Amino acid sequence: MPLRTRIILLVSLAFALAFAGLVAAGMQRERLAAVPYTDIGTLGQTALWREILEDDTQRLVTLSDEILADDGLREAVAARSLPQMRSLATSWTIPRFASGTLTDLQILDDSGQVLFASSTAAEPPRLLDFSTIRNVHAGAAPRGIRQITADRFLVIMARQYPTPGGDFVLALAASAQPALRRFARSMEADAFLLSTRGRLVEGTKPELWRALSLDLPQRVATVRQAALDGRLYSVTAIPLQDLSSGSAGLLVTVKDATESLSALHRLTMITGAGVLGLLALLLGGLYLYLRESFRPLDRAVGVLGALSRGDTSVDLPKESNDEIGEIATAVQGLRANLVAFNDSRRQRELQRRRQERFVRRQMENLASTLEPGAREEVLTDLRRIVAATSGAAPEAEGAEPAPQSLARLIREDDQLGPLAAVLQQMSGRVVDQHRRLSELVTRLREALVRETQLASLQQELAIARDLQRSVLPVDFPDRPRFSAFGLMESAREVGGDFYDFFEQRDGRFAFLIADVSGKGVPAAFFMAIARTLLKAIALFESDPASCVRQLNELLAAGNDQMMFVTLFFCVLDPATGEVEYVNAGHNPPYLVGRSGEVTMLATSDDLAVAVMSGVDFSSRRIRLAPGDTLVLYTDGVTEAFNNEDQPFGDARLKATLEAAPRRDPQNLARAVAQAVRTFESGHQQSDDLTLLAMSYKG
C-alpha cells in the first residue's frame, strides 16, 4: 500500500474517531441533561396517580364506615349466618355495583377464610393475602391497588371489623378502570396497567399497546421512545405498589409525540450530514496535496525496483537539491557497485557448483541406507536444491515447494548452506530411525507382558462372574399360592445388581431386588456383602422397615468408598396376599392385574441404603388379588439406550407389560428383557439388567 494512502487512512481514522467521540459525548450529554426532566415527569405522574387512587379509596373508606355502623350486619357476621349476611349486605352492594363504586365486598376471619363475598362466582378470588390480614389485625388499614386475576386490577381497602363473636376483616374493592381513565384524561394520553410479568391487564387502548410490544423493566421508572406506523410515541412507565407495599406491576403512559421527536431527529440528521460533508472535503484536499508532493519520490522508487531486478541500464537524473536529489546520487553509486558485484558473483558461482555436485553425489549414496519414506524426502530436498541453483522452478519438475528453512538458505546464496541443512536433516532421520526401532522392541516386550496379565485377569473375572451368578436363586418352584421368576444380565463380567427370595420363620416369603452404585468388581463385592447381611437380618426380623434400617446401619459404618444401594424389599403373606414393602430409593415396581391393567406402586421419600447412618425407613402395605403379578426391576431396564441415544423409559416398560400375551412371572420377565434387547438394536449395554416377578394365585 503506498505511503500517501496510509497517511490518508490514518488521518481519516483520526477524524472518524474524533467525530465518533463528539457524537458519543453529545449523546451522553443529552442523556444526562434529560435525567432531571425524566425524574420530574415520572414523579409528577406518580403524584397524580396517587391522588386519583386516594380519591377512589376514600370513597371505599366512607362506605366502610357506614357498613361498620350496621348493627344487624355485625350480629349476622358474629353468628356466621351466611343467608342473613347476604340479605343485609345486599342493601349496601346492589346500588353501588350498578354505579361502579363497588365491585366486591368480603368478610374474612383471622385465618384468611372468606366468610362472606358479595360476588356471585362459585369461588370468588380472595381480595387479601395472609400477610395483609395479619397487618389488619395488628391495627393497620391498608388501601391501594392489587392484581386479583390475570386480567383484572382492583382498588382495595381493608380494616378491622369487631363483632361480639370476635374480630374479623372487612375488605372492599372497586374496579381500577375508572381511575385509569381519569389518569389518561389528565395526561391527555393512553394509559395501561401491566402485571409484574409485563403482560397487559387493563388499558384505554389495548390494541395500541399490543402493536408497540415493548419490554419494560420492573420496579424502576422508565422513559422511552417507540415508533409505530410512521408515528413516534413517548412511553413513560412508573412502578406500582400494592396495598401490602409489594410490587403490583407498571402504570404505562403512551403519548403521540411525532411532531416534537421528528423535528429533533431532522436536526440531528442535518448536523451529522454537515459534519460528514466537511470531513469529506478536508480528506479530498489532503489527498490531492500528497499526490503531487510524492510524485518525484515515486519515480525514485521505480528506478530502485529496476536495479533490484538486475537492470543496471536505468538512470535517475538529479531534479532538485532536496532529499529527492540526494536519493538520485545514492542510486547512481548503487548502480556502479552492482556492476562490480555481478562480475565477482559469476566467478564464485562456478566454484560453488563444482563443490555442490560432489557433495550431492555423496549424500545420494548415504540416503540409499535410509527407510523408503526418509530416503524419498532427502532425494526430494536434493532435487529442490538442484532446481534452485540451476534457476529452474521446482514446480516445473513436479516437485513440492521447499520448506521455509531450506528456502531461506537458498535465498541467502550460501554455497554449501542448503546441502548442510539437508545433511543435518538426514543425520536426524538416521538417529530417529534407530530410536524408533529401539522403542518398538521395548513396546513389543511390554505388550507380551500385558497380554499375559490380561489373560489372567479375564480368567479371574470369569470365575468372579460364575461365583456371583451362583449366589442368585436359579430354582423358581411353582408354589400353591404364588410363583416367582428372576433373571439378571450384567453389563460387565461382574455387576452390582442382585435379587433374592426366601422364606422367613413366620411362614412369609421375602422378595428383594437391589442396585449397587457403580459397576464392576467394587459393586460386585458390595452387592455380596449387602445381600448376605440383609438375608441374615431378615431370617430373625419380620418387620421389613426394621430389616432395612439395621442393614443401613451396618453398611454405613466404615463406608469409606461412599457406595450405596437402592433396594425394594417386600414380604408376602401367602395366606392373605398381603405385601408389606420398603422402597429405599429404588425404581417403584409395577403391579400387573389379572385383567391386564398395569399400575405403578406409590413411591416413598426413603433414602438409599448406606448413604448415612441413623435414618429410619417406612413400610407400606398392599393386598394382592388372585392373578396379580408384581414386577420388580432395576434402572438397567428404563435407562437402556438405543443407537439414537434415546432411553427405554417407563412408558415403554408399561406398554411391554400391557402387551405381554401371558401374565405369568417368567413370561413377563422374559418379555421385558427381550423388549429391551430389541430396543437397544446392538447398542452397547449401559447398565446391569435385572428383573424379578412374583404372581399371587390366592
Image (cartoon, helix red, strand yellow):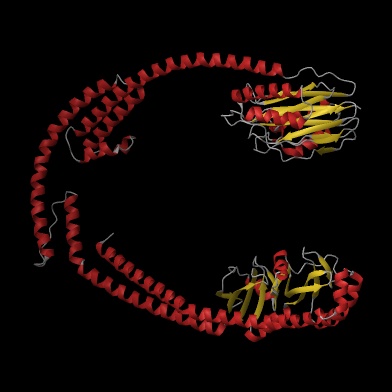
Q: Does residue 604 lie above or below 123 as drawn? A: above
Q: Position of residue 167 (x, y in %)?
A: 79, 70
Let me know if residue 591 appears in the view: yes
Q: Position of residue 310 (x, y in %)?
A: 17, 48
Q: Does residue 590 lie above or below 29 as drawn? A: above
Residue at 27% in and 72% down:
286
Residue closest to the far front: 164
Residue at 11% in and 48% down:
338
Q: Quadrant of residue 671?
A: top right
Along the line of sight, the residue nearer the viewer: 593 or 426:
593
Q: Position of residue 9 (x, y in %)?
A: 31, 65
Residue at 47% in and 14% down:
449
50 sits to left or right of 416 = right
Q: Position of residue 157 (x, y in %)?
A: 73, 75
Which quadrant, please, contains the N terminus? bottom left
Which quadrant, please, contains the C terminus? top right
Let me know if residue 658 appears in the view: no
Q: Quadrant of residue 554?
A: top right
385 sits to left or right of 210 = left
